[in-house]
Image (spheres, rainbow, N blue to C red):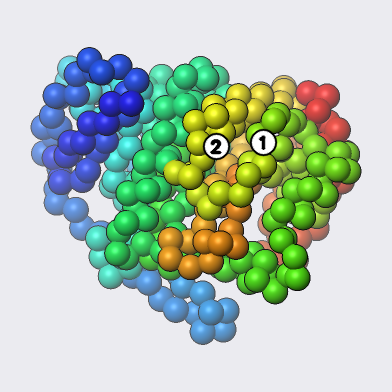
Amino acid sequence: MKRTVTRLADGRELIYFDRRDDADRSAMDERPLPGRATASELRYDPLLDEWVAIAAHRQTRTFLPSTDDCPLCPSTPGRPTEIPASEYEVVVFENRFPAYGDGASGGRCEVVCFTSDHGRSFAELSPEQVQTVIEAWADRTAELSAYPGVEQVFCFENRGEAIGVTLHHPHGQIYGYPFVPPRTRRMLDVARRHPGDLFAEVLSAEREEGVRVVVANDLWTAFVPKAARWPYEVHVYPHRRVPDLPALDGAEREAFGALYLDLLGRLDRLFGMPLPYVSAWHQAPVRTDRDLAWLHLELFSIQRAPGKLKYLAGSESAMGAFVNDVSPEDAARRLREA
């Protein structure tokens, strides 16, 4: 894997990931960009023991541009973008409108472009391209984990306007949180109190019962959790306990790519439409409880039926008490049949 590091006009880091050793990444960003002026601020909520980022500068971020104005497409003569090259495989760069980083909040936010093809989705990538994405995720997780102000690395993709996506180009993000987020803290607190091996027991029970398993291979299992919160929610576990993406071996990375493409295809065939989803990697914190954590992916959609979305209304938004309109067993069956 060839890794080329360069800088954008305002000093932000950009990294190309290429399978080809002869890839030319000499093009420079010559845009007259203003200097970075991030103004994120972390504020502590004493009632919930949580941190909130106040990032008012994100109000001015790019919002649903036309294809001709997409900032994530390769640069062309007369139309420079965030990526100076005229083509690319996978590229990662510092977010121009970060929720965290370079200010009082600490941390770092990056954008991952999965392909230079604006019209494709992750489900349509080749297996080779998926492997490049996985290598980029692992590379960035390892590097950001070494930053003194980063406590957890979160790789994720938001897909679809219904989810809140503001750029249609196939991409994801990576957050280097300056704290351990509430969801991770709670999971690991539960695992610490559990008398056995919590994650191993959950995976074993789902594989043994089988009714909620959607797809599996020798190294990974994808299942709808028994207490799923979302209409269509799938968790993907490696069969071997590893704390994070860099710890996966070559066989596990390859096996995940094949299974993940299968799973994404099922989601899109479910209602005959590109399903909006969030795809989120749960990795171990950088410095604490790495022995308790078990790397896994959480993939969920708010689409509960054709033309119907799952909205987080009073109970979910105000109290965090979820009500799911689709039974997990039925969701798993439908995805198996898709």
Q: Secondary structure at mark 2?
A: strand
Q: How many marks?
A: 2
Residue 92 in view, yes or no? yes
Answer with the quarter of the image where residue 111 lies: top left
Q: Residue at x 29, y 45 (%)?
A: 94
Q: Nearer the viewer, residue 11 or 256?
A: 256
Say whether residue 158 is left or right of residue 298: left
Residue 165 in view, yes or no? no
Q: Nearer the viewer, residue 214 or 287?
A: 287
Say whether residue 276 is left or right of residue 212: left
Q: Residues within 10 Å of mark 2 (few under 14, many from 20)?
A: many
Distance CA(mark 1)–CA(mark 2) = 23 Å
State which mark lies toward you, 1 or 2.
1
Checking the image for residue 220, the label placed there is 1
Q: Residue at x 73, y 70 (%)?
A: 194
> Between disc 1 and disc 2, whose residue precedes?
2
Say whether residue 248 is left or right of residue 99: right
Q: Disc 2 marks which amino acid?
A: Arg
Q: Secondary structure at mark 1?
A: strand
For the N terminus, give its image quadrant.
top left
Q: Disc 1 marks which amino acid?
A: Trp
The residue carrying mark 2 is 159
Answer with the quarter of the image where residue 189 lies: bottom right
Q: Position of residue 262 (x, y in %)?
A: 66, 24
Does 34 appear above or below 114?
below
Q: Position of residue 182 (x, y in %)?
A: 56, 68
Q: Position of residue 167 (x, y in %)?
A: 43, 36
Q: Position of residue 272 (x, y in %)?
A: 72, 22
Q: Nearer the viewer, residue 162 or 100?
A: 100
For the C terminus, give its image quadrant.
top right
